[in-house]
Image (cartoon, rainbow, N blue to C red):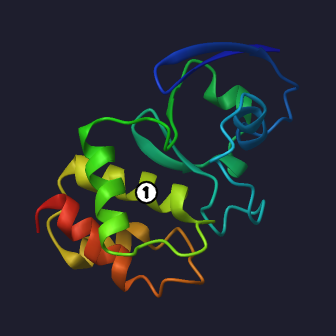
């Protein structure tokens, strides 16, 4: 089946099998920041923004994303740049495996106008991190959001 995806502003048309997962299609297109973690939609390492909302791409069939606007961490606008700098300044990444999912989830929170630390904690809860303990991630998101 032929599908089209706009990834970080660039249109891609690809042939996919109906059972193919979005995470694998994105990686084959060269977006290796989209991690394959658990393959069960538990860890969040594969999180991308699809039509403005965070989704776990290991839980989305590529055909379901036909016509979608997808953002990975290679997307770099003012908000994403601010978040990346804040993550660096606050040491919010250690091994880096969950970082792309954490950044995209945080991007969504900042773009929609997160207003409290509680919202941040709840918002990033779908991305598992075994290294940071989350405190520095929360601090980085608060800084990027101006809280």
At x 69%, y 54%, the residue is: 35
Disc 1 secondary structure class? helix
How many discs mark residues in the rendered view?
1
In this rendering, position of residue 126 left or right of residue 108: right
- Quadrant location, the N terminus: top right
- Quadrant location, the C terminus: bottom left
In this rendering, position of residue 132 left or right of residue 95: left
Which residue in the protein does label 1 denote? Answer: 103
At x 72%, y 43%, the residue is: 23
Question: Does 20 sit above or below residue 95?
Answer: above
- Judging depth in this view, the residue of 21 and 90 nearest the camera is 90
At x 72%, y 50%, the residue is: 58
Tell me which corner region of the image, top left, top right, bottom left or bottom right, holds residue 45: bottom right
Looking at the picture, how far across and down is residue 135, in whole percent? 35, 85
In this rendering, position of residue 68 left or right of residue 119: right
At x 63%, y 65%, the residue is: 97
């Amino acid at each position: 089946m032929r599908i089209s995806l706009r990834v970080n502003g660039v249109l891609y048309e690809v042939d996919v099998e109906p059972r193919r997962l979005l995470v694998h299609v994105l990686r084959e297109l060269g977006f290796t920041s989209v991690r394959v973690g658990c393959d069960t939609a538990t860890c969040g390492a594969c999180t991308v923004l699809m039509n403005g909302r965070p989704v776990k791409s290991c839980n989305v069939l590529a055909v379901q994303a036909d016509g979608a606007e997808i953002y990975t961490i290679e997307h770099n606008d003012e908000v994403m740049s601010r978040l990346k700098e804040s993550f660096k300044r606050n040491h919010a990444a250690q091994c880096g495996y969950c970082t792309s999912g954490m950044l995209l989830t945080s991007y969504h929170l900042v773009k929609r106008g997160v207003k409290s630390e509680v919202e941040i904690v709840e918002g990033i809860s779908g991305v598992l991190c075994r290294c940071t303990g989350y405190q520095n991630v929360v601090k980085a998101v608060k800084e990027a959001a101006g809280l």
